[in-house]
Image (spheres, rainbow, N blue to C red):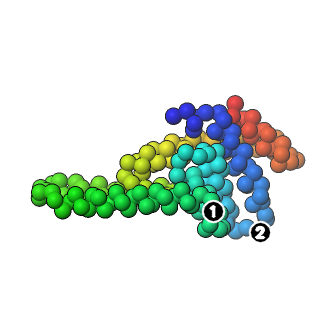
Amino acid sequence: MRGPTAKAFKQGFLRSFLLSLKSCRTGDMSLQERKRAVRSSADAAMATARGGGAIWPRALLASSSSSPSSSSWPGLLLNAAKVKTTRCKSTARRCCRPKRSSSEMIARRLVRKRTKILRGMVPGGELLDSVSLLREAMDYVVHLRAQVAVLRRVSNAMHHMAATSYLTGLDLSRLAQGLLHRVCN
């Protein structure tokens, strides 16, 4: 997949991340509030940098927005209706099949259990059928890896800048430019 490994994705993620971090820069936050702010900033930046074409970015952005009437929800609800009809058809097919062996029933139960867990892990996954869920999960994991790579490089750049005492007396815009240069080059 080109998107998450591309320089444009990393730059877009980093820009969005730094902008959202700049907006939550208050001194009266507790450690837990600061952690939540950084995590939600990283999630929103990753979803924004990913763009359209997948459901998980819209679900992440919708969950981070305060209003439930976000513009991303209609597309998610359409997929929920599709899933419901798919499940009804499979229930009808199940009634007409011959009995399964014990090992086959155990395997199916394990697959259902793991699919249920995966639905809870992927944003918007509870609205998808199994094939779409696997596709979304793969895309989400690839983008999470890219997010981790960028955040590691940011952390290393911050340590390097602090070690060389480059960080003292530096305003936030120059810091952001320095990080963009270090991380994306």
Identify which residue, 152 or 8, lies in the foreground: 8
Residue 70: which disc? 1
Nearer the N terminus, badge 2 or badge 1? 2
Q: Element type at marker 1?
A: loop
Q: Position of residue 139 (x, y in %)?
A: 49, 44
Give the quadrant of residue 37. Answer: bottom right
Q: Is residue 116 visible?
A: no
**Label 1 crowd (10 A; few <14 / some 14-19 / many >=20):** some
Q: Position of residue 23 (x, y in %)?
A: 77, 58
Q: Is residue 178 visible?
A: yes
**Label 2 crowd (10 A; few <14 / some 14-19 / many >=20):** few
Q: Residue at x 66, y 55 (%)?
A: 41
The residue indicated by pointer 2 is 28
Image label count:
2
Identify which residue, 44 or 59, lies in the foreground: 59
Give the quadrant of residue 28. Answer: bottom right
Residue 166: which disc? none
